[in-house]
Image: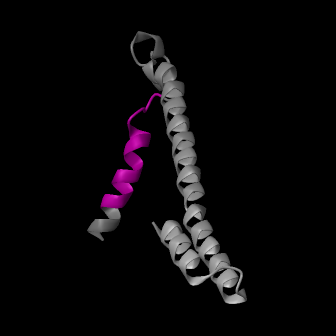
Amino acid sequence: MKRLALVVVMLATPAMADPEEYGHMMGWSYGHGYGMIFGPVLWLIVLGLVVAGVIWLVRRLDTQPLHRGSSAAIAELDMRFARGEIDADEYASRKKLLSS
């Protein structure tokens, strides 16, 4: 029961903070309006961070197919060796080049 009373008091506190109603915006030009100036700046910073994060993520994901490409090249090299298009020495030297 005490917990319920505590929750009710905490939820009612913002309503009791301004008993005169509509008085909270009357003095915004006397030092309380900084949020109106810096609010958009804060959102621009947040938007910039989100855009930078998306760019970073796309670049990071874009570099991963390079590893898949080298494994595809090795698979093609294996197929050429299996078909007899290249000899064992050439196969070994090219595989060494691709794996390094």
Q: Quadrant of residue 50?
A: top right
Residue 8 or 37: which is nearer the viewer?
Answer: 37
Left or right: residue 59 versus residue 100 is right
The image shows residue 38 at horizontal and vertical percentages of 47, 23
Residue 29 colored in magenta in the image: no
Furthest-top residue in this view: 30
Count of numbered circles on the image: 0
Q: Is residue 22 visible?
A: no
Q: What residue appears at the point 64 percent right and 77 percent down from the top-left corner?
A: 77
Q: What residue appears at the point 38 percent right and 57 percent down from the top-left corner?
A: 8
Q: Is residue 16 visible?
A: yes
Q: What residue appears at the point 34 percent right and 53 percent down from the top-left corner?
A: 9
Q: Which residues are magenta?
A: 6-20
The image shows residue 81 at horizontal and vertical percentages of 65, 84
Q: Quadrant of residue 63?
A: bottom right
Left or right: residue 76 versus residue 89 is right
Q: Magenta part mainly helix, strand or loop?
A: helix
Residue 14 or 85: which is nearer the viewer?
Answer: 85
The image shows residue 1 at horizontal and vertical percentages of 30, 71
Furthest-left residue in this view: 2
> In the picture shown, does residue 17 fall above or below 63?
above
Left or right: residue 48 versus residue 15 is right
The image shows residue 62 at horizontal and vertical percentages of 60, 56
Residue 15 colored in magenta in the image: yes
For the C terminus, the quadrant is bottom left
Q: What residue appears at the point 43 percent right and 33 percent down from the top-left corner?
A: 19
Residue 6 or 35: which is nearer the viewer?
Answer: 35
